[in-house]
């Protein structure tokens, strides 16, 4: 978290390995984070994490409003119950629909980003970034984790309104960094196109 702070992270979501030292261990690390931890589907009532995370954050970027929220994977069966304690898992699909709608429609965000630790895709019925994108209505971009998927280009998925949603992931261990550019018109604020690049940090010194 110290390194992420030095790198200038705006926000992060919570993954299963954040519980490796128990929920109290996660709490002890948070003072090192100079950015908010976003999550909508972990209910931390009755734990030391209560009040230590927030569902979403709105950033002002050169006159644009960027709404960001987070969702996490189900911990049961993946993490020892003793490590996450009384944390309750809420449906990430329902929470994503709720908060993306709130950010886009109520808060009038120009861009809505989901920070996900669900995993990109699975062969079974497990909830994934791809499934979330297809079910979504108001998400513009999903930046994922958990499955450590290395991608040269992001995946474009049609949502419920048949609008393209971008789903991306940058592998793991900081081996790659991804960049996606959205272009807006000054007058209307409408997104007109997006471009993306992926840089392999093992092969290039340019970031």
Image: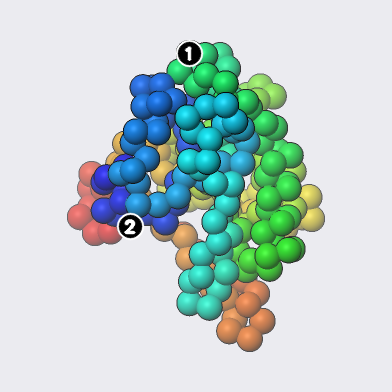
11 or 123, nearer to the observer:
11
Q: Quadrant of the C terminus?
A: bottom left
| Label 1: which secondary element | helix
Residue 174, how many percent across, how many down? 31, 42
Q: Which residue occupies the extreme left position in the image?
A: 205
Residue for point 61% across, 41% down: 40
**Which label is found at residue 46?**
none
Query: Contact, CB < 8 Å: mark 2 with mark 1?
Result: no
Cα–Cα span, label 2 and label 1: 33 Å
Left or right: where 174 falls relative to 53: left
3 or 161, nearer to the observer:
3
Q: Earlier in the sequence, mark 2 or mark 1?
A: 2
Residue for point 20% across, 55% down: 205
In the image, residue 130 sits, relative to residue 195, either above or below, namely above
In the image, residue 94 sits, relative to residue 86, either above or below, namely below
Q: Check disc 1: other Cα within 10 Å, few if <14, some if 14-19, many if 20+.
A: few
| Label 2: which secondary element | loop
Location of residue 183 (image quadrant): bottom right
Q: Check disc 2: other Cα within 10 Å, few if <14, some if 14-19, many if 20+.
A: few
Q: Which residue occupies the extreme bottom position in the image?
A: 187
Residue for point 73% across, 63% down: 106
Residue bearing the label numbered 2: 8
Residue 134, how many percent across, how many down? 72, 44
**Which label is found at residue 82?**
1
In the image, residue 111 sits, relative to residue 134, either above or below, namely below
Residue 198 visible to an observer of this rendering: no
Residue 42, how many percent across, how many down? 59, 33
Residue 123, how many percent across, how many down? 63, 24
């Amino acid at each position: 978290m110290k390194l992420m702070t030095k790198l200038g992270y705006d926000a992060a979501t919570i993954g299963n390995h954040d519980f490796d030292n128990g929920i109290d261990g996660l709490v002890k690390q948070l003072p090192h984070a100079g950015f908010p931890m976003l999550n909508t589907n972990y209910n931390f009532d009755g734990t030391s994490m209560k009040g230590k995370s927030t569902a979403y954050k709105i950033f002002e970027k050169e006159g644009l409003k960027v709404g960001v929220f987070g969702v996490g994977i189900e911990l049961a069966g993946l993490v020892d119950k003793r490590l996450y304690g009384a944390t309750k898992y809420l449906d990430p699909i329902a929470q994503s629909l709720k908060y993306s709608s709130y950010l886009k429609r109520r808060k009038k965000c120009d861009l809505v980003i989901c920070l996900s630790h669900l995993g990109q895709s699975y062969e079974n019925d497990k909830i994934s970034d791809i499934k979330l994108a297809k079910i979504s209505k108001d998400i513009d971009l999903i930046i994922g984790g958990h499955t450590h998927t290395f991608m040269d280009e992001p995946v474009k998925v049609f949502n419920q309104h048949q609008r393209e949603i971008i789903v991306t992931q940058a592998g793991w261990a900081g081996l790659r960094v991804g960049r996606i550019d959205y272009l807006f018109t000054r007058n209307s604020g409408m997104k007109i196109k997006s471009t993306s690049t992926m840089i392999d940090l093992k092969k290039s010194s340019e970031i």
